Amino acid sequence: MEPLESDDPAAVGPYRLVARLGSGGMGRVYLGYSPGGRQVAIKVIRPEYVQEPAFRQRFAREVIASRAVSGFFTAGVVDADPEGPRPWLATAYIPGPSLQRAVQRSGPFPEPSVRALGAALVEALTAIHGASLIHRDLKPANVLLAQDGPRVIDFGISRLCEHSGLTLTGTTIGSPGYMSPEQIQGLPVEPSTDVFSLGSVLAYAATGASPFGEASVPALLYRVVNEEPDLQAVPTGLRDLVGRCLAKKAADRPELPALLHALTGGRPPGELLAPGWLPEPWQGEDTAPALPDTPTPA
């Protein structure tokens, strides 16, 4: 979370903006407050996309579809304006760190936490796919960790680009190291592309590193398409499952119901997300930093 800068808006629609939460290929994300004091995360689309009528039309359709996603492990859409000068989308604010930040600060997760994380992400993807959306950019930075379970953010927005390639007007679509081979090759994608990304996310949670390592963007893209992932550090109980998620051919990846059963052993996912599912030092902590001069809820 960072302070607003001079080129940031003070408000978007009825929401007062108080901080930057991050940025990505499609836009910048802010922490905002509704007139009644409700915290929201607001994604404002980059100016270069605003000038493209096809993008606006697709964005409007995606907003409608995203509202239909009702899974507990997704950050639900609460408001949007696809017709404004700068289209925006507001979702519920999740007061927790991203998986990326948590692992960078405290190291890899133990296997029980990875299984709980994976079960929740499978449920999130089930809800997203059920709304006829494909995430296309599931990565550690797009998974937020709350005490009662993780939340997937940015669902539906990453599929806005009609192009199948990596860039549009010079902006990267997708995240090297977490994109599926078919995304990189510009082929049609199906829900199984999110399963590949999920495998990379679980490998990262379990080891602290991408299964395709660190390298330049071209090198990473080549490795994803042509080389096998490095899963030696993944716990043996998860290695085969993660490896099947990372199959080069989409048809060889497990479907979500089978993946859920493999992660939970048939137990209800909620049992894995009991208090303490998060490893230290994240258990029982309010990981959202306090902000000065915040409004009092009405």
Image (cartoon, rainbow, N blue to C red):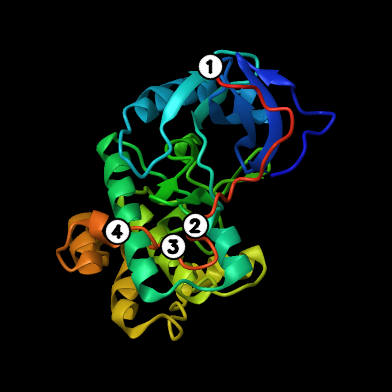
x and y percent of residue 36 in the render? 55, 16
Query: Which of the two discs, 3 and 2, labels the residue nearer the N terminus?
Result: 2
Q: Name the residue under label 3.
A: 278
User: Residues under labels 4 and 1: Cα distance?
Assistant: 33 Å
Badge 1: few (under 14), some or many (20 or more) residues near its Cα, within 10 Å? some
Q: Looking at the rendered structure, which numbered label has been put on residue 24? A: none
Q: Name the residue under label 4.
A: 119
Q: Determine the residue positioned at 63% across, 35% down.
A: 27
Q: Marks 3 and 2: CB-CB under 8 Å? A: no
Q: Quadrant of the N terminus?
A: top right
Q: Looking at the rendered structure, which numbered label has been put on residue 184? A: 2
Please identify the quarter of the rendering in which residue 131 is found: top left
User: Mark 3 falls on what kind of element?
Assistant: loop
User: Residues under labels 2 and 4: Cα distance?
Assistant: 26 Å
User: Residues under labels 3 and 2: Cα distance?
Assistant: 33 Å
Kind of residue sitting beneath label 3: Leu
x and y percent of residue 190 in the render? 32, 48
Q: Mark 1 points at which residue?
A: 81
Query: Which of the two discs, 1 and 2, labels the residue nearer the N terminus?
Result: 1
Q: From the viewer's side, name the closer residue of 70 and 193.
A: 70
x and y percent of residue 268 in the render? 18, 57
Of all residues, the one furthest to the right in this rendering is: 6
Kind of residue sitting beneath label 4: Ala
Badge 3: few (under 14), some or many (20 or more) residues near its Cα, within 10 Å? many
